[in-house]
Amino acid sequence: MADVTFAVANGALKRLRDMGDGTHAEVVSDAGSITPPTAPTTSSYTTLNTSFASSGDNTVVSATAGQTTRVFALALTFASPVDVTIKDGAATTLGVFQGIISLVLDPLLPGVPRYITTANTAFIINLSAAIACKGTIWHTKG
């Protein structure tokens, strides 16, 4: 008998190899037909470098009509300990961090944002005191 290829769930293909003794074995890897993924040459995120030192609300990613902001990662440092509140617009709190001097939120799973604002609202970082903040935020709009 010959090798057999057939469709399974979601259109994926399975291949069974003829073992020459009347049996077949499922092909898990066929090095000759596997193409390794290539490294991306551009980022799918917008990279925003930010710097501010005002107490209260600091608009980091401005609102865009009809669009949400999806924040995938951020890395911030502060000149001295400060309480930080991450906000969706002026009213909705997304996260609170107390007495920090650095904040690093790595991406979760690929394509899964850490924070999503509602449409037409800014991504805001509120500081409890006028402390210098510098960092980078990786986000998309849509």
Image (spheres, helix red, strand yellow):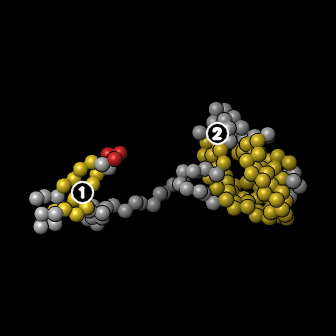
In the displayed structure, 28 sits above or below 52; it is: below
- Relative side of 119 to 102, left or right: left
For marks 2 and 1, the one nearer the N-term is 1
Circles 2 and 1, Cβ within 8 Å, touching? The answer is no
Q: Type of residue at label 2? A: Thr
In the displayed structure, 61 sits above or below 37; it is: above
Q: Secondary structure at mark 1?
A: strand
Residue drawn where x is 64% and y is 39% of the image = 68
Residue 52 visible in the displayed image: no
Front one among 18 and 32: 18
Q: Quadrant of residue 121?
A: top right
Taking the view exactly as shown, the residue that stands out farthest to the top is: 66
Q: Position of residue 6 (x, y in %)?
A: 23, 50
Q: Position of residue 139 (x, y in %)?
A: 63, 49
Q: Type of residue at label 1? A: Arg
> Which residue bears the numbered disc 1?
15
Residue drawn where x is 82% and y is 59% of the image = 98
Q: Quadrant of residue 90?
A: top right
- From the viewer's perspective, is the residue at label 2 or at label 1 nearer? 1
Residue drawn where x is 22% and y is 59% of the image = 16
Front one among 142 and 49: 142
Q: Quadrant of residue 123?
A: top right
Q: Secondary structure at mark 2?
A: loop
> Which residue bears the numbered disc 2?
68
The 10 Å Cα crowd at callout 2, few under 14, some 14 to 19, many 20 or more, is many
Residue 126 visible in the displayed image: yes
The 10 Å Cα crowd at callout 1, few under 14, some 14 to 19, many 20 or more, is some
